[in-house]
């Protein structure tokens, strides 16, 4: 029996030491989500961080613990600077009546008093119980198991895979659900912690300790052995091999990597051969479950080539297709292919970090891909998938994480051909707690990626895989609210792969709300419509957007709800919905075209949308524009009121950051921050006409940079026009002449952002320059086939732009009492299927 800690950690002390040595990420961000009960739920000291097991084979397993009386004391965990003996026991029963192995190890301060015990000479394919003791205190009892012998018949295997557990994302209800399952083991695919700017060993140790204060994470570790691999956040976001992705705290990157690897090894149940040597650590290896399954566990961070083209989501060109670039490094790639060739297992599993399937975010003729994923290394991916196809590897299944969303993908040797043969199946699990701000971008791109069999980005969770010789079943688990420690969990979809038949098919009917949104007059499917499910008390349960077929899946437990639907160019609707257990609730949602209006109470859907219901929206049947009446964008702090914040065409989502419309500067804007003109401040925004043949809004203000300059901008929208007319009247109310520079700056913040100027096409340079326009327009676009434009009355201006923003500039002199009117149309349109997304602006 465990002896209670004679001096337990108080909640106040716990919250104090949680601050540790955090870097740029604020302590409040790391600690604010800390449930008050966590201090009371720590395991008995010195075993406050629990116990864990991992890396099982058929005769051995690793046991782990850490001695830490004050676990978030970053310096020493509250332990003395001396070695401490730790006893361990392994038994065939939870009461320890039949102890089969025992011994003593030493926890040293140089390893943060962590303990790794490789217990061998165990019987294959059976469960064991284990515990530690030190200083007269026993740890909690953990449970672990060995695998069936290699080559032995194994009828059944059940495991879960998880990834991406940002501390700021919530208290891990997904682990709470996982710990209650019956599983053989858990595979962790990376992002066990999320780094701060501070790259010291002390900081990485503090983070690992902080994460293990979660009682649900500790419960999962105590109940099942874990098979571990890492991704990037264990060291630094998007690092590649020896190449950092940022400056961090200024220390040499390989020193940071060594510190991250050292703390990772110290705090997880890893084998002795995985102990790091400086910045190097062996993580790729094979794990066998009899002859039922062989796992090739990959490391796609330590040896990879640097991301091409600076990384991010971009058009793949040039170096992207260099065959020498690699995710795994040549040696690991050869090891993987050799293992697949030699394997006698029924199921061959590649457990790795990110998405292997291709995914094109661009709905037009171009291509936009995520260069940090396998899409950034297409020759390396092709070598693996071609090898699988050529050598007819038995039942290949790829597991992935990283992108915080659930996917089921067909893997092909040619993703550009929908009819190409499927050679493997990929399951990508959503995150334990980390958010997915790119969900709408993915949903919008599904039409260009028919090999994606299922996608959902609304929920956090994990995946359970139940495997026999004849079939592989994957249950995609979700929690309704990752910030609620007691949030219930559900299966949002279940898929099955049959032995010898690559590709998964859905085997459940689906629970929750399945809606299809269409045009009431034409019956056409409506993509990119926001569907929100509200509880009976009016609080939001979940929000998502319709896919290209107009469908949306919004999981909800049994009960009554209100479903609201909001699409650009259409009148919003609300419908009641009752969800019953075990069957989908299907809604046929038909929308009518929108009237021409200006007013509050509505928002524009989209991943970049920031205007609130209290701001003004001008809308008709073709577009919607939000103008701030109070919402302040940090980049335009103090001058956002009266300026456009959100903009979308019918069938599209908002991708706008803002339009700085207008500015009035005493000097010509120059440099990389030229767009950030805080030079017109509006004091009043009013609706002039709310409905009718036209709707209009007026913003009244002054220049903050030019004395005596009054600025009044009127926005007007009419039916059946894909633009809002914006007229800015500048009046010199002083007694002296005033000369100033004016125009507008346009910033698109969505995927594939790029600017365009008449006569110059798409701007690709990151260095801003002058571009005299051949026609009076400037524009921006992204991967969603939506083009934004500012169309002026004349081309008496110069365009000044980089690839990711564009602005107009003209110099004006006003005599006392003089006025100047700047007229332009704010446009949002479908760019069409042509190669030039800006050609449509020249046609308006």
Image (cartoon, rainbow, N blue to C red):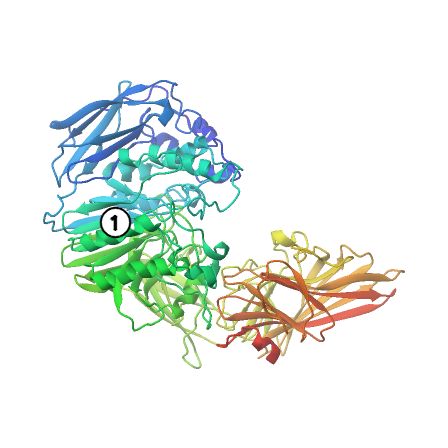
Question: Residue 642 in the image: x percent, y percent?
Answer: 67, 61
Residue 482, x across and y down, in percent: 38, 48
The residue singled out by tag 1 in the image is 296
Q: Tag 1, which secondary structure?
A: strand
Q: Quadrant of residue 38?
A: top left
Residue 200, x across and y down, in percent: 46, 33
Q: Is residue 36 visible?
A: no
Residue 764 in view of the camera: yes
| Residue at figure coordinates x 39%, y 65% from the top left | 576
Q: Quadrant of residue 417?
A: bottom left
- Location of residue 243 with respect to 748 vertically, above or below: above
In the displayed structure, 490 sits above or below 112; it is below
Q: Is residue 23 left or right of residue 97?
A: right
Q: Nearer the viewer, residue 767 or 445?
A: 767
| Image coordinates for residue 806, horizontal then vertical, percent | 63, 63
Quadrant in the picture for the N terminus = top left
Count of numbered marks? 1
Foreground: 186 or 482? 186
Query: Going 18% across and 33% down the picture, which residue do you hit?
Result: 129
Q: Is residue 14 left or right of residue 104?
A: right
Please tell me whether residue 78 is drawn above or below residue 208 in the rendered image: above
Left or right of residue 121: residue 834: right
Q: Residue at x 24, y 34 (%)?
A: 62
The C terminus: image quadrant: bottom right
Mark 1 closeness class: few <14, some 14–19, many ≥20 residues within 10 Å? many
Of the pair 329 and 814, the residue shown nearer to us: 329
């Amino acid at each position: 029996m465990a002896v209670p800690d004679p001096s337990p950690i108080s909640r106040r002390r716990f919250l104090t030491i949680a601050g540790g040595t955090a870097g740029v990420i604020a302590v409040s961000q790391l600690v604010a989500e800390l449930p008050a009960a966590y201090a009371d739920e720590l395991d008995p000291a010195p075993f406050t961080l629990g116990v864990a097991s991992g890396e099982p084979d058929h005769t051995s397993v690793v046991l782990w613990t850490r001695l830490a009386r004050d676990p978030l004391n970053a310096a020493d965990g509250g332990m003395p600077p001396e070695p401490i003996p730790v006893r361990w026991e392994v038994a065939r029963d939870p009461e320890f009546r039949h102890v089969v192995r025992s011994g003593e190890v030493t926890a040293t301060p140089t390893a943060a008093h962590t303990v790794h015990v490789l217990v061998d000479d165990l019987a294959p394919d059976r469960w064991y119980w284990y515990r530690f003791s030190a200083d007269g205190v026993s740890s909690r009892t953990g449970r672990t198991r060995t695998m069936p012998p290699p080559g032995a018949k194994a009828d059944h295997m059940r495991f879960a895979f998880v990834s991406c557990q940002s501390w700021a994302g919530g208290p891990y209800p997904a682990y709470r659900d996982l710990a209650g399952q019956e599983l053989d083991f858990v595979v962790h695919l990376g992002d066990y912690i999320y780094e701060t700017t501070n790259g010291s060993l002390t900081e990485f140790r503090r983070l690992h300790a902080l994460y293990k204060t979660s009682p649900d994470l500790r419960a999962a570790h105590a109940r099942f052995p874990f098979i571990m691999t890492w991704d990037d956040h264990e060291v630094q976001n998007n690092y590649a091999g020896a190449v950092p992705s940022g400056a961090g705290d200024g220390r040499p990157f390989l020193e940071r990597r060594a510190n991250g690897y050292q703390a990772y090894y110290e705090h997880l149940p890893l084998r002795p051969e995985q102990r790091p040597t400086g910045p190097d650590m062996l993580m790729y290896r094979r794990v066998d479950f009899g002859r039922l399954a062989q796992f090739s566990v990959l490391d796609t961070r330590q040896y990879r080539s640097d991301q091409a083209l600076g990384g991010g989501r971009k058009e793949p060109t040039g170096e992207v297709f260099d065959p020498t670039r690699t995710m795994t490094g040549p040696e690991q790639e050869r090891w993987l292919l050799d293992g697949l060739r030699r394997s006698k297992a029924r199921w061959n599993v590649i457990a790795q970090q990110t998405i292997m399937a291709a995914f094109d975010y661009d709905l037009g003729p171009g291509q936009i891909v995520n260069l940090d994923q396998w899409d950034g290394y297409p020759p390396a991916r092709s070598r693996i998938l071609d090898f699988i196809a050529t050598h007819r590897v038995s039942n290949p299944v790829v597991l992935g994480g990283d992108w915080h969303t659930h996917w089921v993908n067909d893997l092909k040797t040619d993703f550009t051909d929908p009819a190409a043969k499927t050679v493997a199946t990929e399951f990508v699990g959503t995150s334990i707690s980390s958010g997915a701000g790119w969900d709408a971008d993915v949903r919008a791109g599904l039409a260009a990626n028919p090999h994606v069999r299922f996608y959902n980005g609304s929920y956090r969770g994990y995946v359970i895989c139940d495997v026999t010789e004849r079939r592989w079943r994957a249950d995609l688990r979700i929690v309704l609210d990752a910030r609620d420690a007691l949030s219930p969990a559900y299966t949002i979809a279940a898929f099955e792969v049959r032995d010898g038949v690559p590709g998964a098919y859905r085997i459940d009917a689906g629970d929750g709300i399945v809606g299809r949104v269409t045009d009431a007059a034409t019956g056409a499917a409506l993509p990119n419509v926001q569907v929100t499910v509200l509880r009976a008390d009016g609080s939001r349960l979940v929000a998502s957007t319709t896919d290209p077929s107009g469908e949306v899946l919004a999981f909800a437990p049994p009960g009554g709800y209100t479903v609201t639907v909001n699409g650009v160019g259409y009148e919003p609707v609300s419908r009641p919905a009752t969800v019953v257990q075990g069957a989908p609730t299907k809604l046929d949602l038909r929308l009518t075209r929108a009237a021409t209006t200006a007013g509050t109470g509505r928002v524009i859907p989209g991943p970049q949308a920031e205007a609130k219901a209290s701001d003004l929206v001008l809308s008709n049947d073709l577009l919607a524009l939000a103008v701030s009446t109070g919402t302040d964008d940090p980049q335009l702090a103090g001058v956002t009121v009266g300026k456009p914040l959100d903009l979308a065409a019918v069938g599209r989502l908002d991708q706008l950051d803002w339009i700085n419309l207008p500015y009035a500067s005493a000097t010509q804007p120059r440099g990389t921050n030229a767009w950030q003109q805080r030079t017109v401040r509006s004091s009043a925004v009013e609706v002039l006409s709310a409905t009718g043949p036209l709707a209009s809004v007026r913003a009244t203000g002054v220049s903050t940079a030019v004395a005596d300059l009054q600025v009044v901008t009127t926005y007007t929208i009419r039916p059946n026009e894909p633009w809002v007319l914006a007229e800015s009247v500048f009046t010199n109310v002083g007694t002296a002449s005033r000369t100033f520079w004016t125009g507008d700056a346009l910033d698109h913040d969505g995927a594939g952002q790029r600017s365009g100027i008449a006569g110059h096409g798409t701007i690709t340079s990151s260095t801003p320059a002058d571009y005299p326009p051949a026609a009076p327009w400037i524009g921006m676009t992204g991967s969603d086939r939506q083009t934004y434009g500012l169309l002026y009355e004349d081309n008496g201006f110069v365009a000044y732009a980089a690839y990711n923003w564009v602005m107009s500039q003209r110099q004006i002199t006003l005599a006392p009492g003089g006025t100047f009117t700047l007229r332009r149309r704010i446009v949002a349109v479908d760019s069409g299927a042509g190669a030039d997304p800006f050609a449509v602006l020249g046609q308006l």
